[in-house]
């Protein structure tokens, strides 16, 4: 399949948005989440977490948005995870 100019433009747009979502401010947000997880673990006298994994899928469309998040904490050789899904309809 031959690439078209339109496909190239969509690709550039996707790359620009991907870069924005991986910006320094996003890294700072996740560093803050890590610090908060560690603080809560310490306050509750839990073992120090090994790491936290956050998987987020956002579906944006004409009808609204859906956000799916899986938050996993790895501590004491175990994985503790929670999943949450929220949906917001587009406003007229």
Image: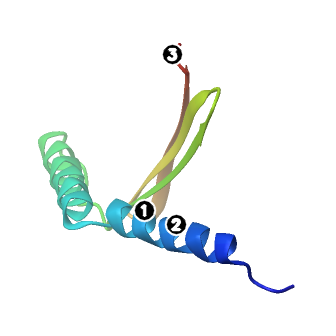
Furthest-top residue in this view: 92
Task: Measuring from the top left, give residue 71's x and y in whole percent.
Answer: 45, 49
Specify which label sits upstream in the sequence, 1 or 3.
Answer: 1
Corner quadrant of residue 90: top right
Residue at 20% in and 67% down = 24
Task: Measuring from the top left, give residue 67's x and y in whole percent.
Answer: 53, 38
CA distance for labels 1 and 3: 23 Å
Mark 3 neighbour class, 10 Å CA radius: few under 14, some 14 to 19, many 20 or more? few
Mark 2 neighbour class, 10 Å CA radius: few under 14, some 14 to 19, many 20 or more? few
Kindly state the secondary structure of the residue where label 1 is placed: helix
Kindly state the secondary structure of the residue where label 2 is placed: helix
| Numbered label tally | 3
Task: Measuring from the top left, give residue 20's x and y in whole percent.
Answer: 33, 63
Furthest-bottom residue in this view: 2
Q: Left or right: 34 with respect to 56?
A: left
Q: Left or right: 88 with respect to 52?
A: right
Q: Circle 2 sits on which residue?
A: 14
Kindly state the secondary structure of the residue where label 3 is placed: loop
Residue 79 visible in the displayed image: yes
Label ID, residue 91: 3
Colour convention of the picture: rainbow
CA distance for labels 2 and 1: 5 Å
Task: Measuring from the top left, give residue 6's x and y in whole percent.
Answer: 66, 70
Q: Left or right: 49 with respect to 87?
A: left
Residue at 47% in and 60% down = 78
CB atoms of marks 2 and 1 within 8 Å: yes
Label ID, residue 49: none
Specify which label sits upstream in the sequence, 2 or 3.
Answer: 2
Label ID, residue 17: 1
Mark 1 neighbour class, 10 Å CA radius: few under 14, some 14 to 19, many 20 or more? few
CA distance for labels 2 and 3: 25 Å
């Amino acid at each position: 399949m031959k690439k078209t100019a339109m496909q190239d433009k969509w690709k550039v747009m996707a790359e620009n948005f991907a870069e924005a979502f991986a910006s320094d401010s996003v890294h700072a947000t996740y560093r803050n989440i890590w610090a908060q997880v560690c603080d809560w673990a310490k306050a509750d006298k839990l073992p120090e977490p090994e790491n936290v994994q956050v998987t987020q899928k956002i579906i944006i469309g004409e009808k609204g948005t859906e956000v799916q998040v899986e938050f996993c904490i790895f501590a004491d050789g175990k994985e503790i995870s929670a999943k949450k899904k929220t949906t917001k309809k587009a406003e007229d």
